[in-house]
Amino acid sequence: MTAPPPFPTRSLSDREFHEGVVTVSHSVRAEYSWDAGEAIGRYLDGLRAGRIMGRECRRCGRVLVPPRMFCEQCFRPTDRWVEVPATGTVDTFSICWVTWDMHRLTVPELPAVIDLGIDGNAGGILHKLGDVEPGDVHIGMPVRAVWKPTAQRQGSILDIAHWAPLKAPDETKNRPV
């Protein structure tokens, strides 16, 4: 890799110096790579494949989602990868009539924390609810992940388009990945 050219410079004229007329223009080319690391990298790969992956700590019995290679409760490495069902319950939610930058919405967004129902689960997934009327949402409502089509997935939490009410127990069986 070659180093970028140095910042373009020139000397000021006497007039520019005394009159304070200084104009500098430069466009920054900031290129970088970011490594998600082992835990989040595998989590994102799982999302791309239509799977929610977690790490289990056998000492405290928790499944960490998003996964971490180190249990912050036991102060030890986690033990193994587990696939977590793409179903859960609404732990808390909000009905938002404005966007994050304060633009009014005609259809509200429904952010929610989804409890994945894992014994000892450390936290939940913050995501949006869909396919449901705001007045029908309630704490404890069973939900399922609605995945984007495989060709549209990029290895992001947004590979889950939204969470929708779980209509039937067999709805999640034999789901194509």
Image (tube, grey):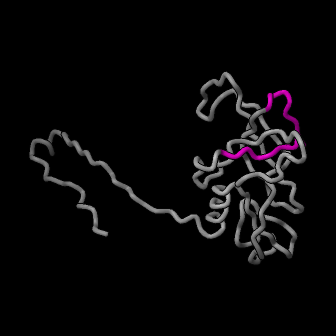
Q: In the rendering, at what x and y percent does residue 16 appear?
A: 14, 42
For the residue pair 26 and 89, the one nearer the viewer reads as 89
| Residue 21 shown left or right of residue 116 in the figure | left
What residue lies at 81% left-to-right and 74% top-to-bottom?
A: 74
Residues shaded magenta: 132-148
Quadrant location of residue 167? top right
| Residue 170 shown left or right of residue 80 in the figure | right
Is residue 117 placed above or below 168 in the rendered structure? below
For the residue pair 36 and 97, the one nearer the viewer reads as 36
Residue projecting furthest to the left: 14
For the residue pair 175 and 6, the one nearer the viewer reads as 175
Quadrant location of residue 57? bottom right
Q: In the rendering, at what x and y percent does residue 173 appear?
A: 83, 52
What residue lies at 9% left-to-right and 46% top-to-bottom?
A: 14
For the residue pair 154 and 69, the one nearer the viewer reads as 154
Is residue 56 placed above or below 16 in the rendered structure? below
What residue lies at 70% left-to-right and 32% top-to-bottom?
A: 109
| Residue 75 shown left or right of residue 31 in the figure | right
Q: Quadrant of the N terminus?
A: bottom left
The answer to if 144 sits in the magenta stretch is yes
Q: In the rendering, at what x and y percent does residue 130 appear?
A: 74, 35
Is residue 107 placed above or below 88 in the rendered structure? above
Q: Quadrant of the C terminus?
A: bottom right
What residue lies at 34% left-to-right and 54% top-to-bottom?
A: 29
Residue projecting furthest to the top: 106
Q: In the rendering, at what x and y percent does residue 129 appear?
A: 75, 38
